[in-house]
Image: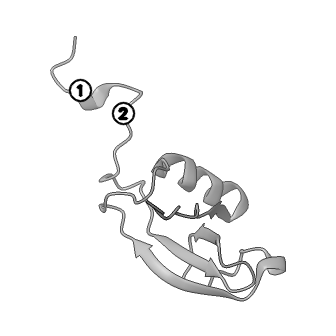
C-alpha cells in the first residue's frame, strides 16, 4: 500500500492544477435559479433565464460551497459550459 493517500484514484484534489475558477450566477428571470460557469461574462449560460448576474466566484483552492461536488460541476462546465442549480426555500419556524 502506498504511503501517499493522494495516489488513490478516488481522491480528487481541489488544490491541483486541474481545478478551475468557477463563477456563480443568479438568474434575474427566476430568483431561485443559480448557475456555475467558467467565464465571468457567463456567455454560455442559457438565454431563457437571462439576465444573469454574477454573485460570487470560487477559486481553484477554495472549498466548494453548497453540497455539490466540485468535480461534477467542473465536468458539466467542460461539457456544456454551465451547471444550473436551484436554492431551496427555507421554511420558517412558526412555533
78 or 84, which lies in front? 84
2 relative to 53 in the view: left or right: left
C-alpha gap between disc 2 and disc 1: 8 Å
In the rendered image, which quarter contains the N terminus? top left
16 relative to 53 in the view: left or right: left
Q: Earlier in the sequence, mark 2 or mark 1?
A: 1
Image quarter of residue 93: bottom left
Percent of width and height locating residue 52? 66, 85
Badge 2 element: loop
**Residue at the (41%, 56%) spot, across then down:** 19
**Residue at the (32%, 58%) spot, across then down:** 63
* Location of mark 2 (residue): 11
4 relative to 60 in the view: left or right: left
> In the current view of this chain or complex, which residue is farthest to the top?
1
Percent of width and height locating residue 68? 50, 50
> In the current view of this chain or complex, which residue is farthest to the right?
48
**Residue at the (60%, 79%) spot, across then down:** 26
> In the current view of this chain or complex, which residue is farthest to the front?
95
Q: Badges 2 and 1: C-beta atoms under 8 Å apart? A: yes
Percent of width and height locating residue 69? 48, 47
Tell me: residue 53, above or below residue 4.
below
* Location of mark 1 (residue): 5
Percent of width and height locating residue 56? 45, 79
Badge 1 element: helix
Amino acid at each position: 500500500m502506498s504511503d501517499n493517500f493522494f495516489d488513490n484514484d478516488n481522491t480528487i484534489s481541489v488544490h491541483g492544477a486541474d481545478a478551475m475558477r468557477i463563477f456563480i450566477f443568479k438568474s434575474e428571470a427566476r430568483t431561485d435559479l443559480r448557475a456555475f460557469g467558467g467565464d465571468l461574462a457567463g456567455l454560455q449560460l442559457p438565454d431563457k433565464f437571462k439576465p444573469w448576474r454574477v454573485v460570487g466566484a470560487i477559486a481553484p483552492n477554495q472549498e466548494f460551497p453548497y453540497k455539490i461536488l466540485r468535480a461534477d460541476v467542473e465536468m458539466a462546465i467542460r461539457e456544456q459550459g454551465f451547471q444550473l442549480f436551484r436554492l431551496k426555500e427555507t421554511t420558517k419556524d412558526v412555533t
